[in-house]
Amino acid sequence: MKKILILIGIMILICSPSLYALSLNGNRLSPIIFEPGKKIVNHYLITDTNKQVNLSLAGDLLQYIHVSEVINNQFDLIIDAPQNLPEPGSYSFTLHATEMSNPESSGVSSFVSVNLRYLVEVPPHGKSISISLEVPDLNEHQEVPFSVNVISKGLENISSLQGTITVYDLQNHSMATLNLQGEPLRSLESATLAATLPADTLLPATYWAEAIINYDGKSAQVSDHFKIGNLNLILVNYTSQLEPQFALFQALVENNWGNPIKIAYAKIFINGTELLTTPTIYLEPWQRGELKGILKTDFAPGNYNGLIELFYDDQSRQENVTFSILPSPSESLAGNYLAVAIIIILLVLATFIIIFVHRRNKK
Amino acid sequence: MKNKFTLSNRNIFQILLLTLIITLIGTTVNVNKLFHIAGNSMGSLTGAASTNAIGSSTITVSQSTSITDDFTVIQFGSGFVNASCTVCNMDSDGVITQGCCGTFNRTNNRGFLLENTGNVNLSVNYTCLSSCNSTTFVGGTSPAFQIKTTNNSVASQSGEVGAADTAGACFGQGVSGLNFTSYKDVSAAGDWLCGNSTTYPFESTDTKDAFVVDLNVSVPADAPTGSQKSALFTFNALATG
């Protein structure tokens, strides 16, 4: 019985699928901000392998980075930032964890390694900030909140932080100005400066805002676009050139507010005759969609006055447009043949004239 | 025959009365419990918190960077090229010029199956040790030793640790798939298979986290005989640490 069990065990070992895995478990560190004298210790656990794992480091700043001995499949990555930092900028280094392979093995075999690439930022020695501006797209009759996130990137504290936000329309006319007041900002920390524009200061349209942040004699600026929306369906683009007889019509429309439009469709008219009612579509807030259908275009080639009537929820509006009915391919082909024939006739005539003149001169 | 268990109207009335009493007692107990929960006021029975104690909770999810090779040894076996042929082609995805490959037994003939078994996106490259080109691995006239990758949603190779893939791997971060899906020569320096040193498209989502690395070997009729050659592949997974 014992022999049978041993045999079964051996068979299981032989038949079990070959599988190698390697996992490194630990907290993510990137991006690492190098601060003078700062020590970072990150603990890692190696799992899923029964092989010995070799650790190594490669890349930048290795004089400040090392790994501890692996004990019970655990180790530490230790970063000791010096008091005098290296040149400010972006650096990277990589931790390699590789299964120890047997170079004597024969055949085609494989091993795995796990590598972690760390991004390191060495901050500049003076005062420096990075800023970002957030302003949401809103519906009309709502307050407009502006938020400027300021991150101190330098090694010196900032004693004074203030700024302004100016709102412009798309013709770059100044529409409103807001002041931003902030607290002193410590080195490598962040702060948010906020301001609100009262409701109904801006009419529905697209605007852009510019934030200028002043800090201890320096400044930084950032801009962002935003929309004040209303219940409206904007016609962005449409098929203006239509094939004769039957044509595919497409209209790109945009929901101009921050709520869904549950039903949107269009009716197409040429010379006052309704030619198409498109299927309805649903539009998420601010979403673009396409209204389309097949038109019967029994018109002679040329330009015609057209009308696109847009329906959205319980409202509608009209856009006057011009449609061009294209000549049929056979007509344009016939036109091409005629032009080619005329050119050939002219060339033949010119040749005869040249020969005639040449002979006459000889005589 | 007279039935011994016939119920009289009186018995039925007694049973109904007993049922009514039990129902009333149960209802009373339950209502009392509800009052107790609600602080003796049904009107205050609500999900809203009624105290001002402030609590906080934190959780940190560690990064697990993990790769699994679900099939690690490819054995084309030993054999010879049939006299009627100039070459024997063997592919780990199963293709073989059967009439030419003599006694090559191909005991372990499937591709390396690489699976992202962690919780972060990866990129993957390979390097090779030992006999890593066609001349050293096979030899003879016009040998070949080549490598290619295929999504396991297409290759359907069994053995994934997680669920079998239903979508292509290597499509994260806007990347449009594996770096090469047709054969190219194996080299010692290797190549990026999915992503590169700064882009990590090999996702950890269970349904699209595996691809197969296949090898193709062409053994010419004049390949030198002798000792078994080895090629040791290392698949390197890279992530942001």
Image: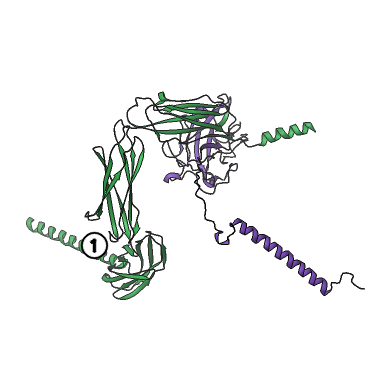
Chain colours: A green, B purple
Q: Is residue B161 left or right of residue A114?
A: right
Q: Is residue B37 above or below residue B224?
A: below
Residue A2, picture quadrant? top right
Residue A327 image point, x, y percent = 29, 68
Along the viewing direction, whichever of B234 and A66 lies nearer the viewer: A66
Which chain's residue wears label 1? Answer: A
Question: Going by the image, does A98 lie left or right of A272?
Answer: right
The quarter of the displayed image where residue B219 is located: top right
Q: Quadrant of the N terminus of chain A?
A: top right
Q: Quadrant of the C terminus of chain A?
A: bottom left
Q: Residue at left 36%, top 25%?
A: A83
Among the 4 quarters of the image, the one containing residue A250: bottom left
Residue A154 in sight from this viewpoint: yes
Pointer 1 residue: A340
Name the side, left or right, on which B106 lies relative to A272: right
Specify the farthest residue to the bottom.
A273
Q: Residue at x 55, y 62 (%)?
A: B43
Residue A24, position as x, y percentages in the image: 52, 34
Q: Is residue B42 above or below residue B161?
A: below
Q: Nearer the viewer, residue B167 or B25?
A: B25
| Image location (x, y in percent) of residue A175 | 24, 55
